[in-house]
Image (cartoon, rainbow, N blue to C red):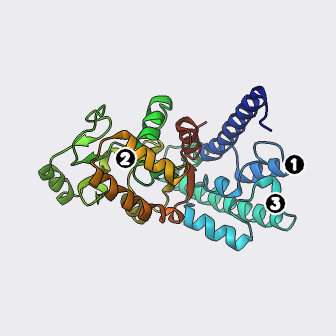
Amino acid sequence: MRPPEVDRVAASKAAVAARRARAAVKNAVVEGTRSASDVVQAGLADQSSAEGGLRVRELMLCLQGLGPVRVDRTLQQLGISPSKRIGGLGRHQQPKLLEYLDSRERRATGAADAAADAAADAAGSLDSASARGRATAVTPTRLVVLAGPTAVGKGTVSTYIRENYPDVRLSVSATTRSPRPGEVDGVSYYFVTDAEFDRMVAEGEFLEWAVVHNQSRYGTPRSPVQQALDAGKSVLLEIDIQGARQVRASMPEAVLVFLLPPTWEELVRRLIGRGTESSEEQARRLATAKVELAAQDEFDYRVVNSKVEDAAREVVDLMNIS
């Protein structure tokens, strides 16, 4: 039986509230106002809390210096599944995780104190305690890469994020293809000539670039991304799968998100329905999409784009933005 509309609405609102509560917990860890150990202890004390519902992997990705590869390796060593929530940790897993987090926090505190004391000595007139405050105030930034097969709706999701989540810095890619209806230069993409793209490649101005569908070239200008990260901002890259691999190689701390269609049939419908390619180009893109879908296991997270606003919210939650 289909639940009454009021029940479905209430359930949807509750799910949104729970996601935002978990995002707030992660944001507090990133900002340094809460320790990971404190979050774990709170989650163990109340399994129904936001802390209890947070996956251990998501919590650890909030810690400075831990990228997806190191987190997965650590979880394997601790005997904890990547999908395990804090409230569901077993009695043997709980002390192992707390011991690991406590040890890591002690090392971080010692390193921060040493750095602060060195800064105070160098300055001569700085107070050591205030230097410690500044040293521990440094927080990690997040670089999230959104990729997926052709026609899955990456551009639609990223546009929704740009329009509804102003705290997210959305990187603008450069491309040699022509603008589609409604696309704006400098907002949707930087539309450049082949000669200009060649120059940018030669001068090392791209964080990543690739030839897509054996036709047009796409690339992410490096400077705006680095400037935003240096300023402590979270940055979202909406790029193709080849580019995502390049970013993972050069910036292993980046979080890779694979956007999936609800079904293959829906992907075909979206590609044909947008009417921006010839039948030959559609066939070529669908063949490429089958290959691209096979790459999803290389990514840290998968998000199904059934509804644009829901997919956008999931992506934003991964950036620790409440």
Report the residue at 38% width, 57% height from top: 286
Kind of residue at disc 3: Leu
Determine the residue positioned at 50% across, 56% down: 256
Q: Is residue 230 visible?
A: no
| Above-or-below relation of 166 to 126 | above
Viewer-side label of 3, 2 = 3
- Identified at 60% across, 55% down, the residue is 61
Query: Which residue, given by chain and number where applicable, does mark 3 sit on?
Result: 89
Residue at the far top: name it: 6
Label 2 is placed on what type of residue? Val
Which residue is outermost to the bottom? 77
Residue 45: mark: 1
Nearer to me, 109 or 294: 294
> What is the three-letter code of the residue carrying label 1?
Ala
Q: In the picture provided, is 90 more to the left or to the right than 74?
A: right
Mark 2 = which residue? 225
170 horizontally vs 320: left or right: left
